[in-house]
Image (tube, rainbow, N blue to C red):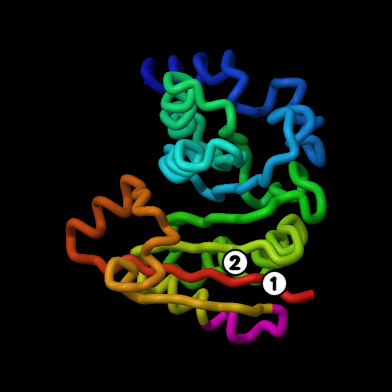
Amino acid sequence: MKSKLKRFEIIAGRDNVIEPGKEIFLKIKGNWKKDYFGNENPMTVELACGRGEYSVGLARKFPTQNFIGVDLKGDRLWKGSTWAHEEGLKNVGFLRTQILNIESFFELGEIDEIWLTFPDPRPRKRDIKRRLTSPRFLDMFKKILKRDGWFRFKTDNTGLFNYTLEELSLRTDIRELNFTHDLYESDLRAECFDIKTRYEEMFAAKGEKIKYLKFKFAE
């Protein structure tokens, strides 16, 4: 417990974590590029980022782009925050909030690209609405993602992946959908840059196939 509390204390004092209690938390919507990054570079958001492996990994690879990891767990965000702090990465930050509240922090079309990496699969039927690829969440993401922006999704969970494909097939606003049930044997692997989260490494080591899809929302 002391370790977790210490981590909360650390991120409270860091500029690269935006969380409740900080003045910028209530003012950041629509102002990420101007007030946080200080530039007009493209902005990618990683939802349910956990420790932020993808956000930080992408920030390392693309120094002229901006990246934001979003998660509720402050002790997890501490890890990504620490990597970015120690490496002097100014093009990555973290937002501590529930994904359900995402529209409170981004304007319409403010995000250039979205990554959803290894979210909780929520396998119980009573939790279907809480899945981050359920209709209500997809509708939110459509609003904040700019026109022609990619939505990218990685998971080890076959049930969640198939559920997502089914939901996408029921919509009339999905275009350029491409997917694979075995990323490591797919031509799509290169566009994931071999950045791996802790969960990806863990499940891949157990023999689970990594699934990946991408699409754009139509008008």
Residue density around tag 2, few if under 14, some if 14–19, many if 20 or more, within 10 Å: few
Q: Nearer the viewer, residue 95 or 190?
A: 190
Q: Secondary structure at mark 1?
A: strand
> Is residue 170 inside the magenta stretch?
yes
- Identify residue for label 1: 217
| Residue stretch in magenta | 166-173
Res 159 quadrant in image: bottom left
Q: Is residue 142 left or right of residue 191?
A: right
Q: Residue at the spot x=62%, y=44% of the render?
A: 98
Q: Residues within 10 Å of mark 1 (few under 14, many from 20)?
A: many
The answer to whether residue 164 is above or below residue 113 is: below
Residue type at the position of mark 2: Lys
**Is 50 placed left or right of 31 in the picture?**
left
Of residues 20 and 55, which is closer to you in this image? Answer: 55
Q: Is residue 38 above or below residue 171?
A: above
Q: How many marks?
A: 2
Look at mark 2 in the image and give the residue it sits on: 129
